[in-house]
Image (cartoon, rainbow, N blue to C red):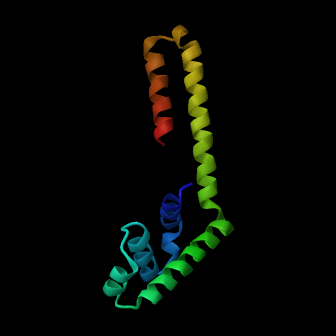
Amino acid sequence: MKDVARRAFLLDFYGPLLTEKQRDIYEWYYQQDLSLGEISQVAQVSRNAVYDLVSRTDEKLERYEKALGLIAAYEKQEAAREELANGFEGWLAANGGSLEAAAREALAALIGRLREA
């Protein structure tokens, strides 16, 4: 997973476990792409303090993931859902001709919902 996407997932899954200041500064740095200087002006702290907070927050989020594994479980679930949708799609392609049009459309709609979930 790309670094930016991983940090977004970490913040989505574990952000509520952070303090408001940690969450805000981490989000400003990684999601809004503000520089250390810009953040230090807004937060009224030194650039070094911002850098330290971002580094410590990064380590904290990785520790949460290592301990809880929510992102790994989510990715595994997504892969299983995609595999299931592909299997149903293959079955529909092979056996859809023997189904009534309404049943074929209903199954296709269910596969679409499975992919979107």
Q: Quadrant of the N terminus?
A: bottom right
Q: Is residue 108 left or right of residue 75?
A: left
User: Residue 40 location, x and y as percent?
Assistant: 37, 86
Quarter of the view holding residue 94: top right
x 33%, y 80%: residue? 38
Above-or-below relation of 23 to 42: above
Relative horizontal placement of residue 21, taking residue 83 as reference (left or right): left
Q: Position of residue 41 (x, y in %)?
A: 32, 86
Residue extending farthest right? 67
* Residue 15: x %, y % from top left: 49, 70
Residue that lies at the very extreme toward the bottom in this rendered image: 45
The answer to whether 25 appears left or right of 61 in the picture is left
Against 71, residue 66 (above or below) is: below
User: What is the quadrant of residue 67 in the picture?
Assistant: bottom right
Nearer to the camera, 85 or 8: 8
Q: Residue at x 65, y 62 (%)?
A: 69
Residue at image position (45%, 74%) is 26
Horizontal and vertical percent for residue 36?
A: 40, 80
Q: Going by the picture, which residue comes out furthest to the top?
A: 98
Residue at 49% x, 24% y is: 107
In the image, residue 8 above or below residue 60: above
How many labels, in total?
Answer: 0
